[in-house]
Amino acid sequence: MRFGSVILKKPEWNDVKFIQWLWSDPETMIPVGGPIILDYQKAKLWYEKMISPGSQTDNYRLIFNQDSSPVGEISYHRFDPETMSAEFNIKIANEYRGMGYSKDAMILFLDYFFNHAGGLVLKDKVALENNLGKQALLSFGFEHDPSVKKAFMLKITREHFNDLYQNIQIKGSS
């Protein structure tokens, strides 16, 4: 899948090295709860759960720039077929933040979730102190749900996404 400045790809096993680095990088991970060390065994289990063979309730993609360098990740988790909702995740490596990758990746990925996979709502519990993450999602069009107090709950619906981004032509979003 390609849009604007990004390409979204299902990771291959050799891409796990980037994921291990991304999750362990303090500058990238401190705003989202801190670094996560993914050793070989944990990486193998994670890859089997998320990628191969994967699951029907999770969808994970790496974000690559136009130079084919990985710059981050985007995913949804715990898709609920009754409510047609899921939990959203996006991480851009600290050195690539502010370059427009997150917006382009979200347009492409949310178009897939809402208009091809049948999703109705994406939610993201953002850490209260993650001001950069909150601002990025709010400026994209996510809305704050003040009923959740222990995190900054944000959500976006299919209708709201399509109202905001209806004029954008996305090709190859399957």
Image (tube, rainbow, N blue to C red):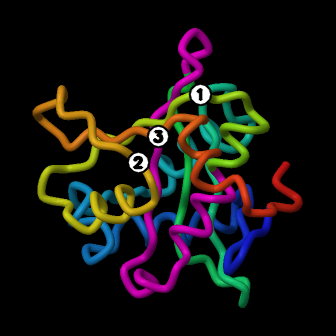
Amino acid at dot 3: Ile
Q: Earlier in the sequence, mark 3 or mark 1?
A: 1
Q: Residue at x 73, y 83 (%)?
A: 68
**Do we see residue 137 in this rendering?**
yes
Q: Position of residue 28 (x, y in %)?
A: 32, 72
- Residue 60's mark? none
For label 2, the residue is: 142
Q: Position of residue 62 (x, y in %)?
A: 63, 63
> Regarding mark 1 in the picture, which secondary structure is present there?
loop
| Image quadrant in which you'd find residue 153 | top left
| Position of residue 51 in the picture relative to residue 159 (left or right) | right
Contact check, label 2 and label 3, Cβ < 8 Å? yes
Q: CA distance from mark 2 to mark 3?
A: 5 Å
Amino acid at dot 1: Leu
**Looking at the image, is 115 positioned above or below residue 43?**
above
| Position of residue 99 in the picture relative to residue 154 (left or right) | right
Q: Earlier in the sequence, mark 2 or mark 1?
A: 1
Q: Residue at x 70, y 53 (%)?
A: 166
Q: Residue at x 54, y 41 (%)?
A: 160
For label 3, the residue is: 156
| Image quadrant in which you'd find residue 133 | bottom left
For label 1, the residue is: 120
